[in-house]
Amino acid sequence: MKLALLSDIHANLPALEACLAHANAQGASQFALLGDIVDYGPYPAETVERCRQLEKEGAIVLRGNHDHCPSPSSTPATTWGDLISSWTFKQLNEDQQSWLAQLPLTAIIDKIFLVHATADAPEKWHYIQDERLASRSLDAATSTHPTIRYVFGGHVHQQSLYYRGSGHRLMPFEPKNGIAIPVGTHRHWLATVGSVGQPRDGDTRANYALLDTHTSHLTFHRVSYDHLSVSQAMRDCGLPDELIKRLESGR
Protein backbone atom coordinates (compact mmCIF):
# COMPACT_ATOMS: atom_id res chain seq x y z
CA MET A 1 0.00 0.00 0.00
CA LYS A 2 1.09 3.53 -0.77
CA LEU A 3 -0.71 5.75 1.72
CA ALA A 4 -0.90 9.49 0.97
CA LEU A 5 -1.16 11.52 4.18
CA LEU A 6 -2.64 15.01 3.82
CA SER A 7 -3.53 17.41 6.62
CA ASP A 8 -4.53 21.03 7.25
CA ILE A 9 -6.09 21.68 3.88
CA HIS A 10 -7.76 24.84 5.16
CA ALA A 11 -10.18 25.43 2.29
CA ASN A 12 -7.34 25.70 -0.21
CA LEU A 13 -8.74 23.60 -3.03
CA PRO A 14 -5.97 24.28 -5.60
CA ALA A 15 -3.33 23.11 -3.11
CA LEU A 16 -5.35 19.97 -2.38
CA GLU A 17 -5.79 19.16 -6.06
CA ALA A 18 -2.05 19.66 -6.65
CA CYS A 19 -1.18 17.25 -3.84
CA LEU A 20 -3.73 14.67 -4.99
CA ALA A 21 -2.36 14.79 -8.53
CA HIS A 22 1.20 14.47 -7.26
CA ALA A 23 0.30 11.54 -5.00
CA ASN A 24 -1.53 9.75 -7.80
CA ALA A 25 1.56 10.17 -9.99
CA GLN A 26 3.57 8.54 -7.19
CA GLY A 27 1.24 5.54 -7.23
CA ALA A 28 -0.79 6.29 -4.11
CA SER A 29 -3.40 3.59 -3.50
CA GLN A 30 -4.96 4.96 -0.30
CA PHE A 31 -5.60 8.48 0.95
CA ALA A 32 -5.95 9.80 4.50
CA LEU A 33 -7.07 13.37 5.19
CA LEU A 34 -6.03 14.23 8.74
CA GLY A 35 -8.34 17.12 9.54
CA ASP A 36 -8.67 20.90 9.31
CA ILE A 37 -10.46 20.74 6.01
CA VAL A 38 -11.81 24.27 6.34
CA ASP A 39 -11.08 27.73 7.78
CA TYR A 40 -8.53 30.27 6.51
CA GLY A 41 -8.93 29.60 2.79
CA PRO A 42 -11.42 30.94 0.23
CA TYR A 43 -13.00 27.66 -0.94
CA PRO A 44 -14.65 25.98 2.08
CA ALA A 45 -17.74 24.55 0.38
CA GLU A 46 -15.81 23.32 -2.66
CA THR A 47 -13.13 21.73 -0.47
CA VAL A 48 -15.71 19.96 1.69
CA GLU A 49 -17.39 18.53 -1.38
CA ARG A 50 -14.05 17.33 -2.78
CA CYS A 51 -13.22 15.62 0.50
CA ARG A 52 -16.65 14.01 0.65
CA GLN A 53 -16.05 12.65 -2.83
CA LEU A 54 -12.69 11.25 -1.72
CA GLU A 55 -14.36 9.62 1.28
CA LYS A 56 -16.88 7.93 -1.00
CA GLU A 57 -13.95 6.64 -3.05
CA GLY A 58 -12.40 5.06 0.05
CA ALA A 59 -10.33 7.80 1.66
CA ILE A 60 -10.11 8.12 5.42
CA VAL A 61 -11.20 11.58 6.58
CA LEU A 62 -10.64 12.84 10.13
CA ARG A 63 -11.90 15.89 12.01
CA GLY A 64 -9.58 18.72 13.03
CA ASN A 65 -10.07 21.56 15.46
CA HIS A 66 -11.24 23.89 12.68
CA ASP A 67 -13.89 21.49 11.40
CA HIS A 68 -16.73 22.56 13.67
CA CYS A 69 -19.58 25.00 13.44
CA PRO A 70 -19.22 27.96 15.81
CA SER A 71 -21.83 28.12 18.56
CA PRO A 72 -24.38 30.89 18.02
CA SER A 73 -23.47 33.87 20.14
CA SER A 74 -24.76 37.35 20.66
CA THR A 75 -21.18 38.52 21.25
CA PRO A 76 -19.59 39.99 18.09
CA ALA A 77 -16.43 38.33 16.77
CA THR A 78 -13.44 40.25 18.11
CA THR A 79 -10.45 38.48 16.50
CA TRP A 80 -9.63 37.63 12.90
CA GLY A 81 -9.78 33.97 13.94
CA ASP A 82 -13.38 34.42 15.06
CA LEU A 83 -14.19 36.33 11.90
CA ILE A 84 -12.80 33.72 9.53
CA SER A 85 -14.50 30.89 11.39
CA SER A 86 -17.84 32.68 11.25
CA TRP A 87 -17.36 33.51 7.56
CA THR A 88 -16.35 29.94 6.72
CA PHE A 89 -19.42 28.31 8.17
CA LYS A 90 -21.74 30.80 6.53
CA GLN A 91 -20.41 29.42 3.23
CA LEU A 92 -21.38 25.85 4.17
CA ASN A 93 -24.87 24.43 4.01
CA GLU A 94 -26.34 22.43 6.89
CA ASP A 95 -25.50 19.10 5.29
CA GLN A 96 -21.85 20.09 4.85
CA GLN A 97 -21.63 21.32 8.44
CA SER A 98 -23.16 18.08 9.71
CA TRP A 99 -20.72 16.01 7.69
CA LEU A 100 -17.75 17.85 9.21
CA ALA A 101 -19.14 17.51 12.73
CA GLN A 102 -19.53 13.73 12.52
CA LEU A 103 -16.02 12.99 11.26
CA PRO A 104 -13.98 10.76 13.61
CA LEU A 105 -10.97 12.03 15.57
CA THR A 106 -8.79 8.97 14.93
CA ALA A 107 -8.46 5.96 12.68
CA ILE A 108 -6.26 2.86 12.49
CA ILE A 109 -5.00 1.06 9.40
CA ASP A 110 -3.07 -2.07 10.32
CA LYS A 111 0.03 -0.75 12.17
CA ILE A 112 -0.80 2.92 11.49
CA PHE A 113 -2.53 5.31 13.91
CA LEU A 114 -4.00 8.43 12.31
CA VAL A 115 -4.99 11.60 14.18
CA HIS A 116 -5.14 15.33 13.56
CA ALA A 117 -3.24 16.39 16.71
CA THR A 118 -2.07 13.80 19.26
CA ALA A 119 -3.07 10.27 20.19
CA ASP A 120 -3.01 10.93 23.95
CA ALA A 121 -5.87 13.46 23.86
CA PRO A 122 -7.08 13.94 20.30
CA GLU A 123 -9.98 16.13 21.39
CA LYS A 124 -7.70 18.62 23.19
CA TRP A 125 -5.69 19.53 20.09
CA HIS A 126 -2.21 19.48 21.62
CA TYR A 127 0.68 20.54 19.38
CA ILE A 128 3.68 18.23 18.89
CA GLN A 129 6.53 20.70 19.24
CA ASP A 130 9.30 18.54 20.73
CA GLU A 131 10.40 15.00 21.56
CA ARG A 132 8.57 14.95 24.90
CA LEU A 133 5.18 15.71 23.37
CA ALA A 134 5.85 13.35 20.48
CA SER A 135 6.70 10.59 22.97
CA ARG A 136 3.48 11.17 24.89
CA SER A 137 1.42 10.79 21.74
CA LEU A 138 3.29 7.71 20.55
CA ASP A 139 3.04 6.07 23.99
CA ALA A 140 -0.72 6.62 24.07
CA ALA A 141 -1.19 4.97 20.69
CA THR A 142 1.03 1.95 21.39
CA SER A 143 -0.25 1.35 24.93
CA THR A 144 -3.82 0.89 23.73
CA HIS A 145 -2.87 -0.72 20.41
CA PRO A 146 0.40 -2.67 20.86
CA THR A 147 0.72 -3.48 17.15
CA ILE A 148 0.99 0.19 16.18
CA ARG A 149 4.31 1.20 14.65
CA TYR A 150 3.43 4.54 13.07
CA VAL A 151 1.55 7.60 14.33
CA PHE A 152 0.75 10.26 11.74
CA GLY A 153 -0.83 13.66 12.33
CA GLY A 154 -0.80 17.27 11.29
CA HIS A 155 -1.94 20.35 13.25
CA VAL A 156 1.49 22.03 13.56
CA HIS A 157 1.70 22.96 9.84
CA GLN A 158 5.27 21.68 9.60
CA GLN A 159 6.86 18.39 8.57
CA SER A 160 8.70 16.46 11.28
CA LEU A 161 9.74 12.90 12.08
CA TYR A 162 10.65 11.15 15.35
CA TYR A 163 11.70 7.58 15.99
CA ARG A 164 12.34 5.29 18.93
CA GLY A 165 15.06 2.71 18.66
CA SER A 166 16.45 0.53 21.45
CA GLY A 167 16.00 3.19 24.15
CA HIS A 168 12.87 4.88 25.41
CA ARG A 169 13.70 8.41 24.29
CA LEU A 170 12.48 9.61 20.92
CA MET A 171 15.01 10.97 18.46
CA PRO A 172 14.20 13.67 15.89
CA PHE A 173 15.01 13.20 12.22
CA GLU A 174 14.89 16.08 9.76
CA PRO A 175 13.05 15.08 6.57
CA LYS A 176 14.14 16.33 3.18
CA ASN A 177 11.80 16.99 0.28
CA GLY A 178 11.39 13.96 -1.97
CA ILE A 179 13.94 11.78 -0.14
CA ALA A 180 12.57 8.37 0.87
CA ILE A 181 13.33 7.56 4.53
CA PRO A 182 13.56 3.92 5.69
CA VAL A 183 10.99 3.51 8.48
CA GLY A 184 11.22 -0.17 9.39
CA THR A 185 8.65 -1.71 11.71
CA HIS A 186 11.38 -2.80 14.16
CA ARG A 187 11.11 0.79 15.42
CA HIS A 188 8.28 3.12 16.38
CA TRP A 189 7.74 6.30 14.35
CA LEU A 190 5.78 9.51 14.71
CA ALA A 191 5.46 12.14 12.00
CA THR A 192 3.63 15.38 11.37
CA VAL A 193 2.96 15.58 7.67
CA GLY A 194 2.79 19.36 7.23
CA SER A 195 -0.01 21.44 5.76
CA VAL A 196 -1.55 21.15 2.33
CA GLY A 197 -3.20 24.55 2.39
CA GLN A 198 -1.15 26.79 4.66
CA PRO A 199 2.52 25.87 5.29
CA ARG A 200 4.28 27.81 8.03
CA ASP A 201 7.95 27.02 7.55
CA GLY A 202 8.81 29.72 5.02
CA ASP A 203 8.10 27.56 1.97
CA THR A 204 4.87 28.34 0.14
CA ARG A 205 4.62 24.93 -1.52
CA ALA A 206 1.95 22.51 -0.32
CA ASN A 207 3.00 19.64 1.98
CA TYR A 208 2.04 15.99 2.24
CA ALA A 209 3.72 12.65 2.94
CA LEU A 210 3.59 9.21 1.33
CA LEU A 211 4.12 5.94 3.22
CA ASP A 212 5.00 2.82 1.23
CA THR A 213 4.14 -0.06 3.55
CA HIS A 214 5.64 -2.64 1.19
CA THR A 215 9.13 -1.13 1.26
CA SER A 216 8.72 0.63 4.65
CA HIS A 217 9.73 4.03 3.29
CA LEU A 218 8.24 7.42 4.14
CA THR A 219 8.68 10.36 1.76
CA PHE A 220 7.82 13.96 2.56
CA HIS A 221 6.80 15.99 -0.48
CA ARG A 222 6.50 19.69 -1.37
CA VAL A 223 4.21 20.51 -4.27
CA SER A 224 4.10 23.78 -6.19
CA TYR A 225 0.78 25.38 -7.10
CA ASP A 226 -0.43 28.89 -7.89
CA HIS A 227 -0.67 30.13 -4.31
CA LEU A 228 -0.87 33.78 -5.43
CA SER A 229 -4.15 33.11 -7.23
CA VAL A 230 -5.46 31.69 -3.96
CA SER A 231 -4.32 34.74 -2.01
CA GLN A 232 -6.10 36.94 -4.56
CA ALA A 233 -9.25 34.88 -4.09
CA MET A 234 -8.90 35.50 -0.35
CA ARG A 235 -8.74 39.25 -1.00
CA ASP A 236 -11.81 39.01 -3.21
CA CYS A 237 -13.65 37.30 -0.34
CA GLY A 238 -12.60 40.01 2.09
CA LEU A 239 -10.60 37.66 4.30
CA PRO A 240 -8.15 39.13 6.85
CA ASP A 241 -4.82 40.50 5.61
CA GLU A 242 -2.98 38.42 8.24
CA LEU A 243 -4.14 35.21 6.56
CA ILE A 244 -3.29 36.46 3.10
CA LYS A 245 0.22 37.42 4.13
CA ARG A 246 0.69 34.01 5.75
CA LEU A 247 -0.19 32.22 2.56
CA GLU A 248 2.01 34.48 0.44
CA SER A 249 5.04 34.07 2.73
CA GLY A 250 4.57 30.47 3.86
CA ARG A 251 4.65 31.66 7.47
Image (cartoon, rainbow, N blue to C red):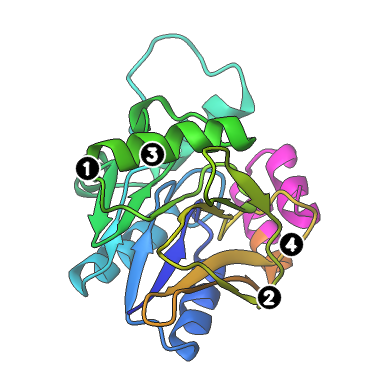
Q: Amino acid at mark 3?
A: Phe
Q: Looking at the picture, does residue 204 appear above or below residue 156?
A: below
Q: Quadrant of the N terminus?
A: bottom left
Which structural element holds mark 4?
loop
The residues colored magenta run 231-251
Which dot marks residue 204? 4
Which structural element holds mark 3?
helix
Q: Earlier in the sequence, mark 4 or mark 2?
A: 4
Residue pointed to by mark 1: 94
> Decide: marks 1, 3 in contact (CB < 8 A)?
no
Q: CA distance from mark 3 to mark 2?
A: 28 Å
> Decide: marks 3, 2 in contact (CB < 8 A)?
no
Residue pointed to by mark 2: 224
Q: CA distance from mark 2 to mark 1?
A: 33 Å
Q: Is residue 52 visible?
A: yes
Provide residue 139's location: percent of width, then percent of height.
Answer: 40, 36
Q: CA distance from mark 1 to mark 3?
A: 9 Å
Q: Quadrant of residue 208?
A: bottom right
Residue at 26% x, 53% y is: 147
Residue at 21% x, 48% y is: 99
Q: Amino acid at mark 4?
A: Thr
